[in-house]
Amino acid sequence: MAGANLEVFRGEIFGLIGPNGAGKTSLFNCLSGLYRPSSGSIRFDGREIALRRPWRIRSAGIARTFQNIALVDELTAFENILVGGHVAGPAGFAASVLRWSRRREAELRAEALELCERLGLTDVMDAMPADLPYGTQKRIELARALMAQPRLLLADEPAAGLSHGEVADFGRLLQELRVERDLTIVLVEHHMGLVNAICDRLAAMESGRIIAVGSLAEVAADPSVRAAYLGAPETSS
C-alpha cells in the first residue's frame, strides 16, 4: 500500500472513497491491527501503533465497525453491545472477563444501557440480532464499538444496505456522537450523499495510493480521481 500517506485531524469526520479494490478496507485493517504493514508508520496521538496487536490498538482508543456486520448471532443485542466493553488481551475474552470485578461489570452494564437509550435500542435489547432489521443491527454494532470509549472511530461503509431515510438518520447520529463523545471519525463510504453531508474532508484512494485530499468538490474535480473513480480520462492542463 505504498503511497497511502494521510493525516487526520482530531475532531473531524474524514471520508475515504475510491473504487472497489482501491485498498480502503485494507487501510482500515492496518489501522485496527488486523493487518501488519510490511513498511511505513502509523501514528496515533504521536505514538507508533503499526505493529501493535488489535487489542492493544483498541485499548489505545481506536474502535471500528465492519463492512459486513460482525455481530455474534448466539448473543442478544444487549450482550453484543456489552462485549465491546471487554477489551480482551492475549489470554482471550474469557480470561479477560474473569478478571473484571463485580463493580466494573455493573459499570459496563450501565454504560451499555445508556448507549441503548441513546441509540434507540432499548426495545430490542433482548432480541437476537438475526431477528432485527439491518439498520438496527448497524446501530448495535456502532454501540458495541462505542463501549470501548474510543477517541477514533473507524466506520467501514456505514450506509451500506440502509434505506435513504436510514442513511440520513445515521449520518446525523454520527455528527451528534462526534460532538457528544469528542470523537474523531474516519469512514469508508460509497454513498456520496452521506460523504457530502457529514465529512469535513475526504481522501480518494486508487490502487493502494492516496490520490487526492480535500473537500468533496475539490476531490471530485481532481483529474486523477475522475479517471480512477468516475471513469473519465485524465487531462493535462
Image (cartoon, grey):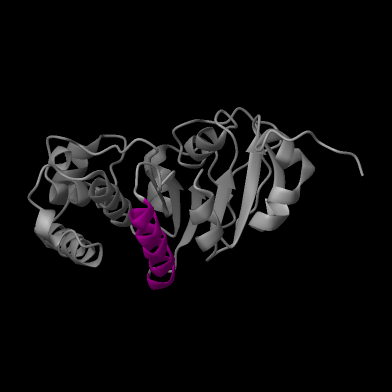
- In the rendered view, tell whether residue 197 sits above or below residue 85: below
Q: Indicate left or right for 107 with 172 as reference.
A: left
Work out which residue is located at the far left of the displayed protein and give it: 126
Residue located at (16% from left, 63% from top): 113
Residue located at (90% from left, 39% from top): 236
Q: Nearer the viewer, residue 117 or 82?
A: 117
Q: Quadrant of residue 101?
A: bottom left
Q: Indicate left or right for 221 with 9 as reference.
A: right
Q: How many marks?
A: 0
Does 95 lie within the magenta span? Answer: no
Q: Nearer the viewer, residue 207 or 224?
A: 224
Q: Nearer the viewer, residue 223 or 115?
A: 223
Q: Which residues fall within the magenta stretch?
A: 164-180
Q: Nearer the viewer, residue 85 or 224?
A: 224
User: Residue 172: x and y, percent?
Assistant: 40, 65
Q: Indicate left or right for 229 with 55 as reference.
A: right
User: Residue 165: x and y, percent?
Assistant: 35, 57
Work out which residue is located at the far right of the displayed protein and give it: 237
- In the rendered view, tell whether residue 80 sits above or below residue 104: above
Residue located at (34% from left, 49% from top): 163
Task: Look at the image and tell me whether residue 193 can be seen.
Answer: yes
User: Residue 2: x and y, percent?
Assistant: 69, 31
Secondary structure mainly formed by the magenta segment: helix
Q: Quadrant of the N terminus?
A: top right
Q: Indicate left or right for 10 with 222 as reference.
A: left
Q: Quadrant of the C terminus?
A: top right
